[in-house]
Image (cartoon, grey):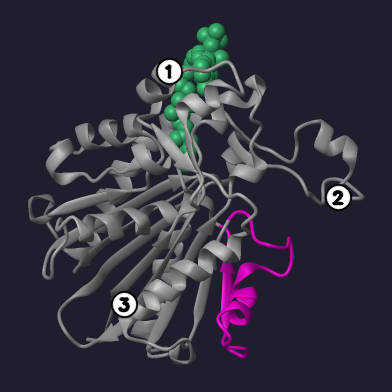
Amino acid sequence: MRKAYIDAIGMYVPENVVTNQDLEKLMDTSDDWIRERSGIQERHHVDGECTTDLALKASEEALEKAGMQAEEVEHIIFSTMASDYFAPGGGPMMTRRLGIPGTPALDIRMACSGFLYGLSVSKAFIESGAYNNILLITSEVQSVALDFTTAGRDTAVLFGDGAAATVIKATDEDRGLLSVKTHSDGRYAEDLMLRTPSTLDNPFLTKELLDKGYGNVVMNGRTVFKHAVTKFPQVIAEALEAAGVEKSEVKLVVPHQANLRITEAVANRLDLEMHSVVYSNIHKYGNTTSASIPIALFEAMQEGKINRGDTIVVASFGAGFTWGASVMRW
Ligand code: COA
């Protein structure tokens, strides 16, 4: 049966590194607090770059690794929470940046689950024969929508900027995406949100709205934490069952890098060995939203932790709430 598999990944993070000590100068926080609550030591923030600048660099690397010219891309899927323009989205912009006008492009804005939703659509597109390859781009610039004063410290310290691009191709071999399961629940929208611009207001963008902080990401951290540690294990179990794979067969779990404490709690609940089976690189990047899983996959591959034939699980939880998991044979 025709399957979709990840052929190549590229990644890019801005050069500008922001350490916990840098944040101590902007707000009432401490390196200890941030490390202990999240595992984060530093993150990268843009310095004048926009979302498609990051996306372009990641895409060029992914295409080179896949041995493809941009002209060969049959479909783009673009995931971000902050595109260059409010409209149009980043997908069409990437056809311009890559010099491939006319290429179909689909925008998804599923926050931290953007990569999982992108995999879900890619799997369906490829298995149905509609396309032979997809360029799934996940590019996030969160630093422009964070409040770097003490009032915003619970959220601002957690997020970083970064991008990844994943080339997904068709194969007749016994490998690739075995299952993808996704969910959403809008009852918790306000527990992790960026409110403005919003059609709840007319006009939808005013100085008063921005003065109220509506242009910043806000979060109810405890509610997010509570739901994340329940939904991650649930959806991983669901994806394993759909793939007909036993937990013992899994070589590596690569969760969305939201918070090291969440990752550890999930490993605990799944009874997985945190340091050998569950991947984490959050200390270097913070939470890069939908880019975090493919960035982690990229680095796990570079470190030799993922090899051909391995069974890998990826999983996400984020704003919406949205969550998902996929089981893949590399
Ligand atoms: N530095 C120092 N102190 C901070 C702080 C910061 N950056 N942010 C919050 N605090 C303070 C709070 O104001 C509070 O002070 P108080 O006790 O005087 O009121 C104290 O630390 C404890 O706050 P609390 O919210 O209870 O901390 P917590 O243990 O729940 O940790 C999070 C906060 C945000 C780290 C935690 O809730 C979390 O990880 N949530 C999930 C976040 C997430 O992953 N989001 C993305 C999902 S995709």
| Residue at point 69%, 38% (across, down) | 216
Q: Secondary structure at mark 2?
A: loop
Give the amino acid type for the residue marked by disc 1 in the picture: Trp
Magenta-tinted stretch: 81-109
In whole angstroms, how far apart are the C-alphas of marks 1 and 3? 39 Å
Asked if labels 1 and 2 touch by Cβ distance under 8 angstroms, the answer is no
Q: Secondary structure at mark 1?
A: helix
Mark on residue 33?
1
Q: Which residue is under mark 3?
A: 65
Mark on residue 204?
2
Q: Position of residue 229 (x, y in %)?
A: 35, 34
| Residue at point 13%, 65% (across, down) | 307
Q: Would you say 172 lies left or right of 212 here?
A: left
Ligand 1 lies under 8 Å from the Cβ of mark 3: no
The vertical placement of 118 against 225, above or below, is: below
Ligand 1 lies under 8 Å from the Cβ of mark 1: yes
Q: Would you say 108 lies left or right of 134 here?
A: right
